[in-house]
Amino acid sequence: MKQSSNKLRPQARSEGLVVKDLPEEVLVYDLARDKAHCLNHSAAAIWRRCDGRTTLSQITSAIKQETGSPIDEQFVLLALEQLGRDHLLEERVEWPAAIPRMTRREAVRRIGIGAVIAIPLVTTIIAPTPAQAATCKAPGVACSTSAQCCSGFCKGNGTCR
């Protein structure tokens, strides 16, 4: 069932996540899925306001005031869609029928090329397993390329530095 924009109250997921705030971004590690997400400033600001009580309109107003950018509900919905797809919300957000869909390309055109950094962006990587993370060779062990060595350097005699 489609929700109207004033009934849409997204809830950020908090269980099973490790969150690290950095100056320009927020890193979120999903323990259940072994995925790390990097939320840029805009995406993080939107995600932080997803408390299950704040409406889409209220989130939009707060972000507009915080950034001074000419954003609207479509802009916030782009971020909410991505956050939902990446399992960072309790439930995925359905785009309200009353609000026309917008692509990232359209958002860039509307906000302006100079404000591209304002576009909410969530970058995701799959974390390596412990075995994958510990496959480098210790100093003194035989190697054929520098990539095999933990130090990143394979000496001329074929051993890791």
Image (tube, rainbow, N blue to C red):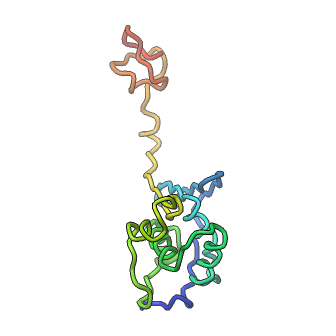
From the viewer's perspective, tell me whether residue 117 is left or right of residue 104: right
Quadrant including the N terminus: bottom left
Give the residue displayed 66% in from the left and 69% down from the top.
66
Residue 152 versus residue 6 in the image, above or below:
above
Q: Residue furthest top?
A: 157
Q: Position of residue 70 (x, y in %)?
A: 55, 73
User: 71 or 134, which is in the foreground?
Assistant: 71
From the viewer's perspective, tell me whether residue 57 is left or right of residue 138: right
Give the residue displayed 38% in from the left and 9% down from the top.
156
Q: Residue furthest left?
A: 144
From the viewer's perspective, tell me whether residue 28 is left or right of residue 62: left
Q: Position of residue 59 (x, y in %)?
A: 61, 78
How many marks do you count on the picture?
A: 0
Query: Which of the 4 image quarters holds residue 42?
Result: bottom right
Residue 140 versus residue 77 in the image, above or below:
above
Query: In this rendering, does residue 47 appear at all?
Result: no
Give the residue displayed 59% in from the left and 55% down from the top.
25
User: 8 or 78, which is in the foreground?
Assistant: 78
Query: In this rendering, does residue 41 appear at all?
Result: yes
